[in-house]
Amino acid sequence: MLREGIVLNESMLKVDAFLNHQMDPQLMQAIGTRFAECFRDHNITKVLTIESSGIAPALMTAMSLGIPMLFARKKKSLTLQDDLYTERVYSFTKQETSDITVSKRYIGPNDTVLIVDDFLANGEAAFGLCRIAEQAGARVAGIGIVIEKSFQPGRKKLTDAGYRVESLARIASLGNHRVTFAEETD
Ligand code: 5GP
């Protein structure tokens, strides 16, 4: 992040070099291994994420746990709408609201779900995924985040709602055009 991240402004970090465009497979594998360690004792049956940048870390987590990965789509497909769980989510990066959907076929009341995403800002995407899992009657065991921007309200909102949040990197500030990690200010 320090070497290859680009601080776009005080609230947005671009990490196209290893996570959001070009992807570093060894890093993704290490991320998956770490999330799997955190949640190994929770009998997770499915890893749930949202397209597209959540897919790589979620897939590696699912591989490490030996279970399937499922990603929410951002656009409704024109067919089979009755077979979809749908939630409305406001996108931090696009600054627009969109529907995210998951097929009812792949998630249900027997599932215990681990939610994984690349970034946590206001918690909209993670909350949308929690609501999808809960619509399906599934249990949410927790949320694994690759990069948490701790100066934004997402973590607090999720933990206040009772969800366990495990973040691998916590950013305290993107001020002065640089990344300051939470550990440096704690
Ligand atoms: P939230 O839903 O928590 O407000 O924002 C999280 C979502 O927005 C993530 O799925 C991620 O794709 C995107 N996002 C939020 N902040 C950033 C950021 O600083 N950089 C990038 N690349 N994506 C972000």
Image: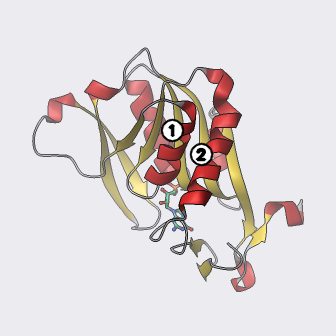
Front one among 148 and 22: 22
Residue 17 drawn at (x, y percent): 54, 75
Count of numbered circles in the view: 2
Q: Is residue 7 left or right of residue 113?
A: right
Q: Is residue 157 left or right of residue 86?
A: right
Evaluate whether residue 160 shows in this view. no
* Secondary element type, mark 2: helix
Looking at the image, residue 139 lies above or below residue 147: above
* Secondary element type, mark 1: helix
Question: Label 1 belongs to which residue?
Answer: 63
Q: Which residue is farthest front? A: 26
Q: Residues within 10 Å of mark 2 (few under 14, many from 20)?
A: many
Question: Label 2 belongs to which residue?
Answer: 32
Q: Residue at x 87, y 66 (%)?
A: 184
Residue type highlighted by circle 2: Gly
Looking at the image, residue 185 lies above or below residue 60: below
Q: Residue at x 16, y 30 (%)?
A: 82
Q: Which residue is farthest left? A: 79
Residue type highlighted by circle 1: Met
Callout 2 touching callout 1 (CB < 8 Å): yes
Quadrant containing the N terminus is bottom right
Front one among 164 and 113: 113
Q: Is residue 135 left or right of residue 151?
A: left
Evaluate whether residue 92 shows in this view. yes
User: Looking at the rendered structure, which numbered label has been put on residue 185?
Assistant: none
Which callout, 2 or 1, points at the residue further toward the start of the chain? 2
Q: Is label 2 within 8 A of ligand 1 (CB to nearest ligand atom)?
A: no
Give the image quarter of residue 183: bottom right
Residue 63 drawn at (x, y percent): 51, 38
